[in-house]
Every structure is written in C-alpha cells, then in structure tokens.
Image (cartoon, grey):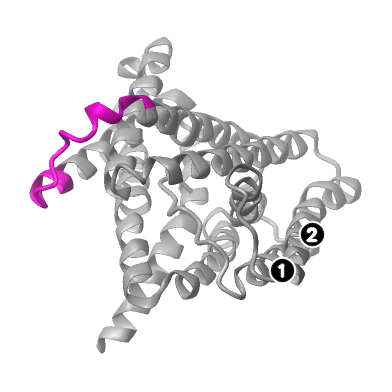
Amino acid sequence: MTSAVQDYVLLISAMLFWGGSWVSAKILVTIAPPMTIGFFRFLFASIFFLIFLKVTGVGWGNLRPNLRMLVLVGVTGIFGYGILFLTGIRFTTAAQGSIIAGFNPTMIALFAHIIHKERLGRRWQYVGFILSFLGVAVVIGVQALLDFNINYLIGNLIILSAMAMWGLFSSISKHAMKRLSAAEVNAGGGIIGCLIFGIFALTEEPWSLPIIEDPVFWFNILFLAFFVTFLGFFFYLRSVNRLGATKTGGFINLVPVFGTLLSVLILHETLHWTFIVGLALVVLGITIINTGGSEEPVPPLDQ
C-alpha cells in the first residue's frame, strides 16, 4: 500500500468511526443512563490521551497553568455537547441525528464568523450556510409534517442544540490552542468533562446497574472512547498534516453519509426520502463552504 493510499484509508476510517458513533450511542442510551455513559466514555478517552502525552514526552504539566481555559473546553465541548448528544439520540433515530450532525462544520464556521470575525474567501460560499440549513430543515421540519412524531421532533431539536454547543466549543478550543497543543486541549477538556459527568453519574448509581456485567455496554463504550475519540482524532490530524487542511476538511462530508448507512444496516432504521434530500443538501452546503480554502474546523473530540 502506497503512502498516499494509506493516508486516505486512515482518513476515511476516521470518518467511518465518527459516523458509527451515532449507532453506538443509540445502542448505549437504550441500556444505560446518559451520565454513566458520558463518565465511562471520557474516563477511558482521557486515559488514552494522557498515556499518549506521557509516551511522546509532552507530559501534562502544561495543563494546570491553563486550567481555566480547559474548564471552559470541558464544560462546553465534553459535558455540554455530550449531554445534549446523548439526550437527543434517546428521542430520535441515529440516521436523523447523524444527518443533523452534518450541519456541524457549518455551525463551526458560523460561530467563527461571529466570534473571531472570520470570513469565507468568496461571497458565494455563504450559499453553503443556506443549503446546509435547508437540509436540516427538511429532516426536522418536512419529515415532521409528513410523518409527525413528537419524540423525533424533540430529539432532533436537541441534536441541533448540540451542534450549536459544539460550534461554541470550537471557538473556545481555537483560543486554547494558542497556548496548548490539540492533544493537550483534548486531554484536559476530557478530564474536566469526565469529572462533571462523574459527579452527576453518582445519582444514577452505575455500580448497581446491570450494564456493569453487559459486554455490549463495554464494547460500545470502548468504541466511543478509543476509536471515535482517540484514534479518530489522530487519524484526522495526521491527514491534516500530510494532505492539507482544505482537502482533509472535505472528507467530513462522509460522516453523515456513514452515520446514515450504518443506522440502516445495523439498527435497521427506515431511510425516508426526506433524509436523502436533507443529507444531500447538508453535504452540498459543506462542500461549498469548504471550497476555496475556508478556515479548517477544530478536529472533533466527540461525534
């Protein structure tokens, strides 16, 4: 396998992991409470990141002086996004959630535009915002009109709120990475988020739940912690370094595609025509925004 082919295989693998996170999360919320899920996921993910920092010689001594910034990262990107993500997926389907999550890069660019005054290279690229929003509107609004389900509507709106939280987190992380490496931001934020999840998980008494002895629970927790949060992060950053930010960013379009396909194949969810139209609009919108070298989104810690 040539180096170039290997680069693309690893990048596509990262997108597959992130798409699969919606299926894995949907399975988890049917057998475990959300705080417990979040605690164990980020407990293992934080351990993986800290081991990596130690092995690579970076250490974690740089985390303490930047504790205030890392608290903001953990509160928004880990706990805030995580609880909205897990709550939303309890109500809606993995397919709908992953399509709405495709709006994520658009939300990141929107917050970067508002907070950091970033601008896209060409005016016509702003059409991408409109198309992405229309795609989400088709999934949430049009589908609700055709086949109304109050649970799906509530879940989809919560997922949309999660995307807004992730956009805010991305802007905070960009500021944090002026002082810290991306790995340090993810490790520090993961630890803070894990602690918050852990405090609330005490009310769920996870030690008394049947999931403690359930291999399905631990398989999905480790999938989210290692493959989605840890390994996907490094595959993505490796690709940014070797292929370039713009070319790599375009592959984020595959996340809702993989998420939708895996939802149908593994969970046997119904794929309505509105999902296909919404997915196409979201992917097209992201493509337009990324065309012409727009600012690269912060690599996700959670999908």
Residue drawn 54% across the image and 71% down it? 250
Q: Are marks 2 and 1 in contact (CB under 8 Å)?
A: no
Q: Nearer the viewer, residue 177 or 205?
A: 177
Q: Give the range drawn in magenta.
A: 51-68
Q: Look at label 2 and name its amino acid.
A: Ile
The kind of secondary structure element at disc 1 is helix
Extreme residue in the top direction: 203
Residue drawn 36% across the image and 48% down it? 229
Q: Which of 283 and 117 is in front in this view?
A: 117
Q: Is residue 22 above or below residue 3?
A: above
Q: Look at label 1 and name its amino acid.
A: Gln
55 part of magenta stretch: yes
Q: Where is residue 35 in the image (x, y as percent from the top left)?
A: 44, 24
Q: In this view, does 164 lie to the left or right of 45?
A: right
The kind of secondary structure element at disc 2 is helix
Q: Position of residue 223 (x, y in %)?
A: 34, 49
Q: Position of residue 187 (x, y in %)?
A: 28, 39
Mark 2 crowdedness (10 Å alpha carbons): few <14, some 14-19, many ≥20 = some
Residue drawn 44% across the image and 46% down it? 174
Q: What is the CA distance from the residue labelled 2 to the residue labelled 1?
A: 10 Å
List the residue tagged with mark 1: 125
Quadrant assignment, res 129? bottom right
Q: The N terminus lies in which quarter of the figure?
A: bottom left
